Image: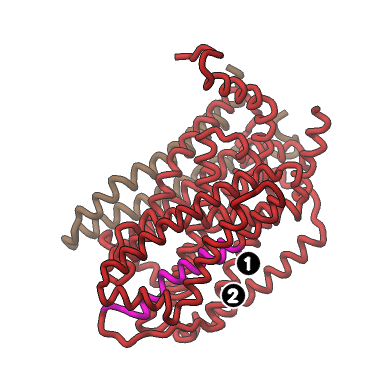
Amino acid sequence: MAEVRDAHEDILFAPIELTGPGFYWAVAGLSVLILWGAIAYGVQFTQGLGVTGLDQPVSWGFYVTNFVFFIGISHAGTLISAILRLSKAEWRRPITRMAEVITCMVIFIGAGQILVDLGRPDRMMNVLLHGRYQSPLLWDATSISAYLTASLTYLYLPMIPDIAILRDRLGKRKLLYSVLALGWTGTEYQQKVLNRAIAIMAVLVIPIAISVHSVVSFVFSMTLQPAWHSTIFGPYFVVGAIFSGIAGLIVTMIIFRKAYGLHYYLKPIHFRYLGQLLLIMALLWFYFTFAEYLTGYYGAEPEELKVFWSKFTGPFWPFFWSMVLCNFVVPLVCLASLKQHTVGKVLIASLFIVVGMWLERFIIVVPTLSFPRLPFPVGVYWPTWVEWGETAGSLALFALFYLLFTKFFPIISIWEIREGREHSVREVEERILSYLPGEVEEKT
Amino acid sequence: MEHPPEISQRLVRRLQWIWLGGAFLLVGGIIVWIIHLIVASWRLDDVIQASVGISIVAIPIFLVFIGVVFYVFWGVALHGGKSED
């Protein structure tokens, strides 16, 4: 049994120990996109925001859409890792690390969108020096800082035993691994301390994550703009964030499963469970979307209806109906039955959802600004190559960060898999027996 | 043998303290920033209750983070490897 385990663990060390041509090709491809983004940003920095499609009244476009989208994707780590860890869902073990890494990387990329949107990044100093807590933008800055700190901590703590394994096993980067492992030797006391710390962080990170996307929604809903001033925007955004987070996680899992040969760890059963979660979130998302638009339509406030019809039949109809197709119709068709071709179906649904959720953010941000309540002329927004470049560069930067992480640390938690084998099988059996009437006396 | 002989234990421990110091610096910096915003709103008589209200929630959260990090450092790095009790 031990030999089988060791042989398969080698798969997890392989990306760290060996670097094949595929890695260099991937880095090269991503670097091209990042270069495009860098050039786009350079042009914008030197010539100003006039090189973008942003103008009055549409002063928020791709950048703010990307910001909301990326912060939403960051909820992958929270849901999959924290909630599943607290609920003792054993199937989480090969998934948690991937989810936590997504969270950390994506928060950086998401927060960076605001810097890009400012046009002049030095104006960030105004937030630091002269910020006013009456502004939801500053609530955002605070809650994202908290989320980033929590997510980094929550990523690092469960990595300590794995870093110690790398320290003892690998012949390279000894100093880095020795420092980060904090002298971990796996004593009972160390394990107790670590488990307690992880549990505290798991409890903390959930309300913080929910607060982050609620606050992101407040940036819109605290204004009196048509189709933004909504009481359900907080939960609506949170549901959308978790929805896109799971989809983003699934896509990442499937890519690395294929690239690193992780089929032994990431089995169809994991994708089936995640697919079921995705289906639930798709239904929930549809419910919120329906409630949001029905309320606006029924109220029939003239300014609200302008935005409403611009989405349903007006200039934004292709985006709106594509969003409905991607976020509801395709997932429903793909995920309704997962008895066969599980991985393929879940992948298709997830890819559509990632696109659909980006469209959803776009559909929230731009139409309202195009048809503002104030007496501006109707705005038209066409992104230029600068915004496309920055968007492509941001996605590529995320992918590159993620790829580089996998070259330094195992992408699947080794010690949690071992723990699952050695302890959890027995624990789960005992737990199930304790649920059943009369089988085992409950300890009080 | 916890570390390979070619790496100085003292260097490792020193870098671990720097690592912990960086965490304190990050969280401390954020707390100082929040306090600065309270002071600014008080000085400008600019709805100080908003700043105080948010800070009451935010600052303890950051303190808990750094508390957890220090607890792990203390428990794992400083005392954890010595005994099995």
Distance of mark 2 from mark 1, alpha carbons? Answer: 9 Å
Task: Name the main secondary structure of what is drawn in magenta.
Answer: helix
Q: Nearer the viewer, residue A325 or A114?
A: A325
The image quarter in which residue B7 lies? top right
Amino acid type at image mark 1: Ala
Percent coordinates x, y for residue A302 in the rendering:
26, 77
Amino acid marked by disc 2: Gly
**Chain letter tied to brown:** B
Q: Nearer the viewer, residue A143 or B44?
A: A143
SS at mark 2 in the image: helix
- Front-most of residues A19 and A202: A202
Asked if labels 1 and 2 touch by Cβ distance under 8 angstroms, the answer is: yes
User: Which comes before the other along the chain, label 2 or label 1?
Assistant: 2
A56 is higher (above) or lower (below) than B51: below
Q: Which residue is mark 1?
A: A396
Q: Chain of mark 1?
A: A
The residue that mark 2 highlights is A37
Indicate the secondary structure of the residue bearing disc 1.
Answer: helix
In front here: A413 or A183? A413
Q: Quadrant of the C terminus of chain A?
A: top left
- Span colored in magenta: A352-373
Please tell me which residue is depicted at 57% across the width and 47% down the height of the picture: A276
Q: Is residue A104 visible?
A: yes
